Image (cartoon, grey):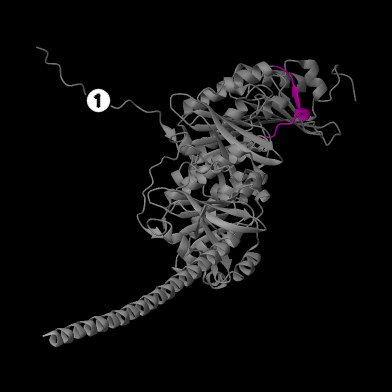
Amino acid sequence: MDARTEFDENAGPLAGHYVLHLFITGATPNSTRAVRNLKDICEQYLPGRYELTIVDIYQQPELAKSEQIIAAPTLVRKQPLPVRRLIGDLSNRERTLAALDLPLRPDFEL
Amino acid sequence: MSTAAPAVVTPLPRLPKAPTGIDGLDEITEGGLPLGRPTLVCGSAGCGKTLMAMEFLVRGVQDFGDPGVFMAFEETADELAANVASLGFDLPALQAAGKLRLDHVHVDRSEIEETGEYDLEGLFIRLGHAIDSIGAKRVVLDTIEALFSGFPNQGVLRSEIRRLFRWLKDRGVTTVITAERGEGSLTRQGLEEYVSDCVILLDNRVIDQITTRRLRIVKYRGTTHGTNEYPYLITEDGFSVLPVTSLKLEHTVSDNIVSSGVPGLDAMFGRKGFFEGSSILLTGTAGTAKTTLAVSFAAEMCRQGKRCLYFAFEESPPQLVRNMQSVGLDLREYLASGLLRIEASRPTLNGLEQHLVTIHRIIADDRPDAVVIDPISNLISVGSISEVRSMLTRLIDFLKVNGITALMTSLISGRNAQQEMTEEGVSSLVDTWITVRDLEGIGERNRGLSILKSRGMAHSNQVREFLVTNEGIRLLDVVLGPTGIVTGAGRRAQQLRDELEALTQQQEHERQDRELERRRRVLEGTIANLRTEFESVEDELRRIDLETQARQRLGE
């Protein structure tokens, strides 16, 4: 199983529940950076209220079609709606947070 | 002494090509698109880029067994399938058969946020997966420029597109990339600099409210190709490129003769008719019975059991049938038996190319022995003279190659009646040229017919007067007057003069006879008188002689 799902025990049906899919291409530098950056963000900003799936589209190319993936890496925010697509290795932390509708400081509650 | 082995002539490898199966395109590309390389098809909106690309794939599957992948950046798979269904392309069935894959790539700027370094590997993976899943040999990217609206980082995009084309080439798939035409350049995003093997430009031009589509091969590396602009059409059967000049003058010819339907006209030709498969031009001013002559020919063909196709650009079929009845030509039985087919349409209904294709298609369906086009001069209203000429050139060539006898009428405007060149300039293309004209005298108009040329046979040099009678067209005998051939009232006057002259001559002759008789009788009378006188003198002399003898006897 190449798609790994990390599920936090404390996650509940909260309004701020995040479903994130990260599409990567194997172990390219961009992909590994994206995974590291995303995990970092989730730990800091969304403790206990996120569901992250990492898909390697080399292994599951049919998902690239169904999910409309063009660029790699791509992060798709499935929830909360609307669906957002973030392309790139997520190293621009400011833009990433803005695109995910997250505050700049981790302890700030929406 | 040199013992060099004779050089083994190995033909140089030719650039392998992938035939497109598109009507006419393989002819001008001399075999198709470069095999295993990308080809750029560019053009403005509404040129049929997508259609051409789709036909390339579908024909590839149907005619050449090459599976294909269509990557659409603008339309969804369902939209595409619906759009080309009207052309008879059943995309869902091809997909189900595993011969075709459609992949819609959705690009929406508003959903995309750049957060760092990225590449377009997703696209490569999708394309690679699609190719591998059906073993595709042909790929279409339609229109890859849509990516430029979705991804703000031009540097990444351009290097990725370059890499994509390189990658497609390495995979050995024949690719068609469509692109929107840009201002002053072939494509809006300058894609032509990445695709260097073959570039095809489609153009959509509106002249005098009539649209003509044209195709040109801008470049085709490593091979010769047609360099002209070729008109093309999008028909019910798909894309159709019409090569203008690739047709060669190589058609076979027939030695058979077909009748013109007018006995007097046949008699003017050395072989008593037209050559089968030749082209005949009938020019004349308005109201000189061009249509009647044309219908006479058509009816004659049908009477001999041959099929005739009549393109009427001025009259509707019922009107034509009715009008021809008045001159004793009943077309109804030929129409009923299917020997005659009348195709009537306004010239302005279509562009010229559309007309040409319509004519081609009907001819292909109907397989006629003769075709009548009445008139070709009307086509001028839908195109410039040079376009009409090129269309007619192609049409006449097409008919000749197929051995179809073609009769075309053309209206010459009254002012230029003397001008022997028809406006369309087709006179040099036709084999036989007949002209009908008004012979206008004092208070009357007569119709005269003459043959300007007839390739390959002797023909009369006379201008023959003809009448349109209840029984059709009748050529009148030539009447020679003191100043040449006379027609109409002049003809009648000449006839009267001739009769009068004959009568006078006869009377004179009779008078001379009578005179001679009288003189003879006078002379005979005179001879009788003289004879009587002579007899009196003789008597007198005899009396004197007797008296003299008597006197002598008395004297003794």
Residue at label 1? B9
Image height of B172 relative to B69, above or below: above
Read off the magenta span. B105-116
Q: Secondary structure at mark 1?
A: loop
Q: Where residue A64 sits in the image (x, y, percent)?
A: 63, 33
Along the horizontal axis of the image, is B233 left or right of B23? right
**Residue B503 drawn at (x, y percent):** 50, 70
Question: x, y (%) of residue B350?
Answer: 65, 48
Q: Could you say which is closer to the camera, residue A89 or residue B79?
A: B79
Residue furthest to the top in view is: B1
Is residue A63 depicted above or below B443 in this figure? above
Which of the 4 quarters of the picture holds residue A26?
top right
The amino acid marked with disc number 1 is Val
Front-lying residue, A46 or B179: B179
Q: Is residue B114 magenta?
A: yes
**Badge 1: few (under 14), some or many (20 or more) residues near its Cα, within 10 Å?**
few
For residue B48, say whether it is visible. no
The image shows residue B400 at horizontal and vertical percentages of 44, 49
Answer above or below: position of B259 versus B90.
Answer: below
Q: Which sits in the foreground, B465 or B481?
A: B481
